[in-house]
Image (cartoon, rainbow, N blue to C red):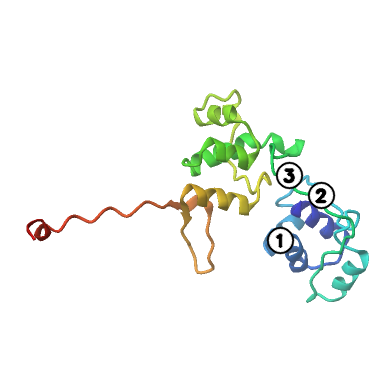
């Protein structure tokens, strides 16, 4: 819940946007947009102290030193083993966004299989087929939106699925920004024409 954590840190601490961005894994400008209420509107802040991610002392230390970086608190409680099977759990508030994410993937990444989309978003194949064929009951209200921005999957999961499907992102600037919207699909090189002289060799 990086955005929810960022909301809480903005509202309850004197940390800089840079410090919050570094801890939450967000861009500094994105944190500033959250503070300006341009994005993440309506998201309830997630308390990292109550969850054991941070301590009050750590926040005070970094608040006094803008150059310092927050360090995750060490937890003695063993972490539960990750689930390896079964459908991906999606919070109730996010489930209504799934059709929008499916529509985005169908439009921008048409070579992703229904199985890959189902695993990535945590939805059913009949729903994907209905959106792909535009027969979904709510098709008129579905607006394609990127699943990462909807927090339905991580960027790493999306990149892994695209790589598996054969997509390679093309850079659009010197900073190495690779928007998923401008993916180029890899194709095998065409075979070279035979050398006419070799036929008479």
Residue closest to the far left: 200
| Badge number at residue 83 | 3
Front residue of this view, candidates 192 and 70: 192
Disc 2 and disc 3 in contact, CB within 8 angstroms: no
- Helix or strand or loop: what does disc 3 sit on? loop
Circle 3 packing at 10 Å, graded few (<14), some (14-19), many (20+), is few
Q: Marks 3 and 1, how far apart in space?
A: 23 Å
75 relative to 87 in the view: left or right: right
Circle 1 packing at 10 Å, graded few (<14), some (14-19), many (20+), is few
Circle 2 packing at 10 Å, graded few (<14), some (14-19), many (20+), is few
Q: Marks 1 and 2, how far apart in space?
A: 22 Å
Q: Pointer 1: what residue?
A: 25
User: Measured along the vertical axis of the image, is residue 164 above or below residue 177?
Assistant: above
Task: Specify which label sits upstream in the sequence, 3 or 1.
Answer: 1
Q: Pointer 2: what residue?
A: 80
Residue 136 screen position, x and y as percent: 57, 25
Quarter of the figure with residue 28: bottom right
Q: Residue at x 88, y 68 (%)?
A: 58
122 relative to 200 in the view: left or right: right
Q: Residue at x 32, y 55 (%)?
A: 189
Q: Residue at x 86, y 64 (%)?
A: 73
Q: Marks 2 and 3, how far apart in space?
A: 9 Å
């Amino acid at each position: 819940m990086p955005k929810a954590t960022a909301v809480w840190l903005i509202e309850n601490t004197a940390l800089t946007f840079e410090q919050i961005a570094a801890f939450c894994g967000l861009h500094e400008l994105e944190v500033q947009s959250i503070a300006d209420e341009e994005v993440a509107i309506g998201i309830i802040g997630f308390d990292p102290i109550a969850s054991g991610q941070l301590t009050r002392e750590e926040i005070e230390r970094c608040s006094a030193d803008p150059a310092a970086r927050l360090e995750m608190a060490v937890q003695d409680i063993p972490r539960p083993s990750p689930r390896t099977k079964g459908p991906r759990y999606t919070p109730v508030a996010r489930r209504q966004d799934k059709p929008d994410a499916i529509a985005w993937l169908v439009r921008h990444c048409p070579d992703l299989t229904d199985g890959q989309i189902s695993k990535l978003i945590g939805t059913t194949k009949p729903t994907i087929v209905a959106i792909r064929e535009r027969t979904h009951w709510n098709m008129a209200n579905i607006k394609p939106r990127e699943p990462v921005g909807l927090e339905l999957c991580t960027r790493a999961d999306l990149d892994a699925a695209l790589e598996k499907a054969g997509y390679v992102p093309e850079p659009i600037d010197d900073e190495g920004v690779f928007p998923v919207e401008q993916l180029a699909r890899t194709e095998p090189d065409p075979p070279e024409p035979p050398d006419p002289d070799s036929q008479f060799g």
